Amino acid sequence: MGDVAVRVVGLLGALGLTLTGCFAGDPPECFGAGDCPGQSACVRGACATTDDGGADARAPRAEADGGARDAARPALDGGVLDPPDGEPPGADARATPDASGDDAGPGARDAQPARDAGRPAPDAAVGPCRPGETRPCGLDVGQCRAGVEVCGVDARWMPCLGAVEPRTELCDGQDDDCDGAIDEQTDRTCGRDQGACRPGVERCVEGAYGACEGGGAPIDEVCDGVDQDCDGATDEGLTRPCGVATGLCEPGVERCVEGGWRDCDAVLLPGARDEDCGAGTDEDCDGTVDEGCECGAGDQRACGLDVGACAPGTQICAGGAWGGCVGATPPGPETCDGRDEDCDGATDEELTRPCGSEVGTCAPGTQACADGAWGACAGEVAPRAEQCNGQDDDCDGATDEGLTRPCGEGEGACVAGTEACAAGAWGACEGATGPRAETCNGQDDDCDGATDEATSVTCGVAIGVCRTGQRTCVDGALGPCDAAPVPGQRAEACEGSQDEDCDGSVDEGCVCRDGDTELCGSDVGACAPGTRTCAGGAWGPCVGATGPGAEDCDGVDDDCDGRVDERITLPCGSDVGACTPGTSRCVDGRFTVCEGAVDPTDETCDGVDEDCDGRTDEAVTRACGSRVGDCAEGTETCAAGVWGACLGATLPSDETCDDRDNDCDGRVDEDYDLQTSITNCGSCGHRCPFRLADSCVDGACRCGDRPMCPVGTLCGVGFCELECGRNGQICP
C-alpha cells in the first residue's frame, strides 16, 4: 500500500492498536471477538493488542452477545450508510459475528475488500465498525486516487486518508473530475461580439484548444451602416471620387454618412445646369455642346390657327427652343351657341346632352343642339307617386319613404295601430293592442264583448296526502284556493308509508331511523374512527373521531389518504443573479439534498451576477498596459459587463537618449547612433566641443580624420589650425 500503509499503521498506533507486534511469530487467526486471548481484539481476521489494557479491544467482544450486540448498533435512521449501488440492503456484513458469536466464515471476510473497493468515503461519524479495521475509500478513476479508512476506538470510521479528490475538468488531456471522461464540456468561446463580428467556439481536442470555429472575422469597411471591421465605429473615414471632368464640370469627393454616400463637393455636377444655346460651352457636362437647340436666339415665326373662332399668334426663340405661342386664340370645346369654337369649319356639330333623372325608377333622355339652342328631352321616364313596392317611384333618392296605413281593431282591451312600408312590404302592426287570453281582471281581454268569462282556475295538487281545489273569479279577482292540505304545509314524518310534504316521494331526505348509531370517520394513517347517532331522520355529527390533518415530513400518513409524506417539498438554493433555486423532497420522513439548483460561481466581467450576492461584476479587475522599459501596468475595472479605462498605468513616451527604454518597445536609445552622433558621441548627452571637432567616429569626437583638436586650436575643414587674433595673440 506504500505511503497509505505507513499512514494507516501510524493511525492505528494513535488509536492504541497494534496488528502483530505483541505476538511471537504470526498473530493468532480469529473469526470473532471471542477468539483472541487476553487484552486483544479481532481485527481483519487477526488478533491485535491494545496499549490501554484491552479496554478498547474488549468493546467489540461485547457485541458477540446476540441481541446486546444488535441493540448497540445505531438504527437505520441514525445514520448507517446505505449499501453501495447494486448491493441489497443488509449486505454490508463485513465478517460481523451472528447472534451465537460465530463468524460468517472466511468466504464472507475475503469477499469484503472487493465489495468495498471504489466505495465513496462516508462521513467519519457514520457506521459501526471494529476498532482497527480498515477499508478502501474514495475513487481510483482518472486523476483521483483511492485512500484508506480506519475504524477508531469509538467503533466509527475515521476520515479517508491519502485520497486524491476530483476537481474541475480542464482542457489538459486528463480526467480531472474523475467521471471516466476526458476534457468533457471544456469548449470555450472565442472571437469578438462587436459590429458584424460574432463569437465562435474553441474546441478542446487531445488536451489543447483548436482554432476558433463558427465566428465572424473582421473585413474591410464598406459604406452600408455596418461595422464590418468590428472596431466599434461605422463607415469611418470612407470616401470616393464623385462628379466628372467634362465640360464645365469638375470632380470632387463624397463621404459615407449613415450607410450612404453624401455631400459631393464637386464644383458642378452633370445635369445641374441646362445647356446655354449659342454660348459654345458644354453646360450640362454630357460631352456635347448646344445639343437639343431648336433655333437661334431672337428668331420668330407664326403659330396657331385662323379658322372659326381661332386667331394666329407669334413664337420667339429663347434658350435654343421656340417659346410659347403668344397672342393666339386656340381652339376650345364646341358649345351650343351657333359658333365654330373648335375651329374645324363646322358649327354646333353633333352636340347633345343628357336630360331628366336616372334616380329610382326614372330614366334620362337626350337633348340635341340645333341653330345654337337645345331641343326637347327625348326618351326620358318621369317621376310618379311613391308606392309600397321597394322602388323609388318619385325619383327623390328614397324608397317607400313615409308610407303608412292603419291596422288592428278597437273592441274591448284592443287598440288599433299602424303598419309602415319597408323594403316594398307592409310591416308589423305597430302600436296596436290585439286580443289575448281572457284573465280575471275585470276587462274584455279577448275583445269578444264579454268580461272575465270562464276564468276560474284549478289550484293545489293531488300528490301524497294533498288534494286539488278551485279559485273562482269575482269582480276581476281570483278568490282563495279551497284545496287542503297544500304542498309544503306538512313536513315529511320519516315513518315509511306516506308523502306528507306532497312532493311525490315518501320519506325523502330520511337517511336513518332515530336512535340508530354507526361508526364514522377513517382508520387510515393517523386518523381514528368515531360514532354518530340518527336524529330527525339524519345522522348527527361524528363524535370521538381523529380526522385528517396537513401532511408533514414525518414518515406518517397525516392526511389519511393511504400515502406517506406525498408531494412534500421545500424550496432550496437561491434565485439571486445567475442562480436558480432547486427543490428538496421528503423521503422516509426526511428532506433530501437540494435538487435542480444552479449554484454560485466566480464572478466574471459580463454584466451577470454569477456569485449570486445581489451585485454584478463587483471587484472584477485585470492588469492593463505594459511592463516593458519605463512603462508600468495599470488596472482595468469591470462595470456593467464592460472593462473600464486603464488606470494607474505608465504609458510609452518618445525615446530620448538617456540609457532608458522610454517608448517601451524593449530597446534602449534605438533612435540614437552613439558611434556617429556629434551630440551624443560615445554616450548619451556627450556633445563634441564646438569648433574643436566636426564629426563623431566610432564613438569618439574627431576633426576630419584626426583626433579632436586641442584647446587653443580650431577645427577647420578636416584639420586643426591655430586660433589667431584672439586675446592679442599674433599668428606666426
Image: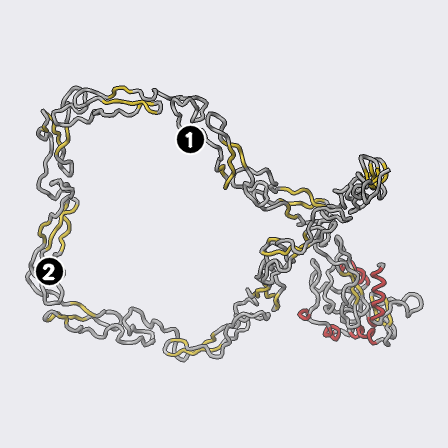
Question: Reading the chain from its start, which is encountered first: label 1 or label 2?
Answer: 1
- As displayed, is residue 606 above or below residue 222? below
The answer to which of 479 and 317 lies nearer the viewer is: 317
How packed is label 2: few (under 14 Cα within 10 Å), some, or many (20 or more)? many
Can see residue 582?
no
Q: Residue at x 11, y 53 (%)?
A: 418
Amino acid type for the residue under numbered disc 2: Asp
**Percent coordinates x, y for residue 361 in the rendering:** 14, 37
Quick one: SS at disc 1? loop
The answer to which of 470 and 498 lies nearer the viewer is: 470
**Percent coordinates x, y for residue 284 in the rendering:** 43, 26
- Which residue position is annotated with label 2? 446
- Name the side, left or right, on which 645 lies relative to 724: left
- Name the side, left or right, on which 436 lies relative to 316: left
- As displayed, is residue 151 above or below residue 546? above
**Percent coordinates x, y for residue 472 in the rendering:** 13, 70
Specify the label residue 272 is tagged with: 1
Where residue 318 sits, quadrant-wise, is top left
The answer to which of 385 and 157 lies nearer the viewer is: 385
| Image quadrant in which the N terminus is located | bottom right
Label 1, label 2: how far apart the Cα atoms are: 96 Å
Amino acid type for the residue under numbered disc 1: Ala
Can see residue 316?
yes
- As displayed, is residue 715 above or below residue 339? below
Q: Residue at x 61, y 42 (%)?
A: 215
Q: Residue at x 85, y 37 (%)?
A: 706
- Name the side, left or right, on which 43 lies relative to 482: right
